[in-house]
């Protein structure tokens, strides 16, 4: 960390207040978190790393009862919160105070607009843009241990030291290309509280192949999924520690009506049966008499015949050509699934926002037969209007 600013390890209320006062007027802050969630329902926040200019700190969230001064900065609309792959960090902050920090800038979301791969990892992005190889020695570190070893703190700080550099270079390049505003809808979607607020009564919709179940079986699945979610929250346990999906489905299909029958359901943990057995038997019996909530419409994937598949390949060829010209990952311009919808007639006009002027008319012209692709004079492809 030569030539980098010294950092503060913040584990007292006074130190937190002083640090937050120093960054309160910053136009942006780079943020990363370290947390554990293997043994709990809610992620256990252990450390928050923050950087702006010469201000750099690790906030020890296990030592502090109140993060109020920092939360105030998270809530400040004048401060851009810079993160990489922001969803888990934003979920943690939402769980902490039921508000999502905004505005944000997610370097992973922005990266494909500058020619990097979709879903690129932080280390790879730092390497590609800044030519820096980050250490991976503490990827699976225990962030609850105290005191944290100095090398572990340095590892954590790297996640914001280079994040700030990424943000500044990416923001400037996006602005020069006229693409910075393109990201607004993606960032707004990440800032939507509905993304992180998952009602327990809706959790059954996450069960794989839920559309296969009907009648009493479906009603019991819905009741058990809600019970599991509420109980997991109350006991702060991972939901699968209470009951895995395959066990939940087995209970719904077999519908045991006694503790003895409950004991014959394979995979149901003995401790769960001893603690919640009577409650589960009652829940299953009552749920089986109710009309289940309707399953959301399920769109069965249409199998493309050879002709339609060829049309997808035609559109995809032009998407790749435009991606090459623009320096944008083709999958971000128009994912293959969207192209499939377009050739089957379901996706006309589906290109939204900044994608539409870049590709919309071109793809429509190819589909309508008004244009064709030909080998370009400088390599690659070019679009030609048909007579």
Image: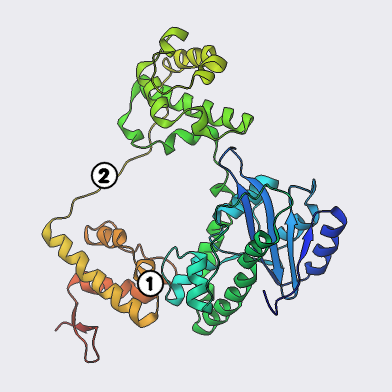
Q: Work out which residue is located at the far bottom of the displayed protein and give it.
A: 377
In the image, residue 129 lies at what x, y percent? Answer: 50, 78
In the image, residue 207 lies at what x, y percent? Answer: 40, 35
Q: Residue at x 57, y 16 (%)?
A: 275
169, above or below 87, in the image: below
Q: In this figure, which residue is indicated by the disc labeled 2?
A: 300
* Quarter holding residue 229: top right
Q: In this figure, which residue is indicated by the disc labeled 1?
A: 329
Q: Earlier in the sequence, mark 1 or mark 2?
A: 2
112, above or below 13, in the image: below
Q: State left or right for residue 44 relative to residue 15.
A: left
Q: Secondary structure beneath disc 2?
A: loop
Q: Nearer the viewer, residue 261 or 335?
A: 261
Q: Residue at x 54, y 40 (%)?
A: 198
Q: Nearer the viewer, residue 297 or 270?
A: 270
Q: Work out which residue is located at the far left of the displayed protein and give it.
A: 306
In the image, residue 22 lies at what x, y percent? Answer: 82, 69
In the image, residue 349 lies at what x, y percent? Answer: 34, 64
381, above or below 352, in the image: below
291, above or below 308, in the image: above
Tell me if residue 292 can be seen. no
Tell me if residue 288 can be seen. yes
Q: Quadrant of the C terminus?
A: bottom left
- Answer few, some or many: residues within 10 Å of disc 1's Cα (few below 14, many 20 plus, some between 14 and 19): many
């Amino acid at each position: 960390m030569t030539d980098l600013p010294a950092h503060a390890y913040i584990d007292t209320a006074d130190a937190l207040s002083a640090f937050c006062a120093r960054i309160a007027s910053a136009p942006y802050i780079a943020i990363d978190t370290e947390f554990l969630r293997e043994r709990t329902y809610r992620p256990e926040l252990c450390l928050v790393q923050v950087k702006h200019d010469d201000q750099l700190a690790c906030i020890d969230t296990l030592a502090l009862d109140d993060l109020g001064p920092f939360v105030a900065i998270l809530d400040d609309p004048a401060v851009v919160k810079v993160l990489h792959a922001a969803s888990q960090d934003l979920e943690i902050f939402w769980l902490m105070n039921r508000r999502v920090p905004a505005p944000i800038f997610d370097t992973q979301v922005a990266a494909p607009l500058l020619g990097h791969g979709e879903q690129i990892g932080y280390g790879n992005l730092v390497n590609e843009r800044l030519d820096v190889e980050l250490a991976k020695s503490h990827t699976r570190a225990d962030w609850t241990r105290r005191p944290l070893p100095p090398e572990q703190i340095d590892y954590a700080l790297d996640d914001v030291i280079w994040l700030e550099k990424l943000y500044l270079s990416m923001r400037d390049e996006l602005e020069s290309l006229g693409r910075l505003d393109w990201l607004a809808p993606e960032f707004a979607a990440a800032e939507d509280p509905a993304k992180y607020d998952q009602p327990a009564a809706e959790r059954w919709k996450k069960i794989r192949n839920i559309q296969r179940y009907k009648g009493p079986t479906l009603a019991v699945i819905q009741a058990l999924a809600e019970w599991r979610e509420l109980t997991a929250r109350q006991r702060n346990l991972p939901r699968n520690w209470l009951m895995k999906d395959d066990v939940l489905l087995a209970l719904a299909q077999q519908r045991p009506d006694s503790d003895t029958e409950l004991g014959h359901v394979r995979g149901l943990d003995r401790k769960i049966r001893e603690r919640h057995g009577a409650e589960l038997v009652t829940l299953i019996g009552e749920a089986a008499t109710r009309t289940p909530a309707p399953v959301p419409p399920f769109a069965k994937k249409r199998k493309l015949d050879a002709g339609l598949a060829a049309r997808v390949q035609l559109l995809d060829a032009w998407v790749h050509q435009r991606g090459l010209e623009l320096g944008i990952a083709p999958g971000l311009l128009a994912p293959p699934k969207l192209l499939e919808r377009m050739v089957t007639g379901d996706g006309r006009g589906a290109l939204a926002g900044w994608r539409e002027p870049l590709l919309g008319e071109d793809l429509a012209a190819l589909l309508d037969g008004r244009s064709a692709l030909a080998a370009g004079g400088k390599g690659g492809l070019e679009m030609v209007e048909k007579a």
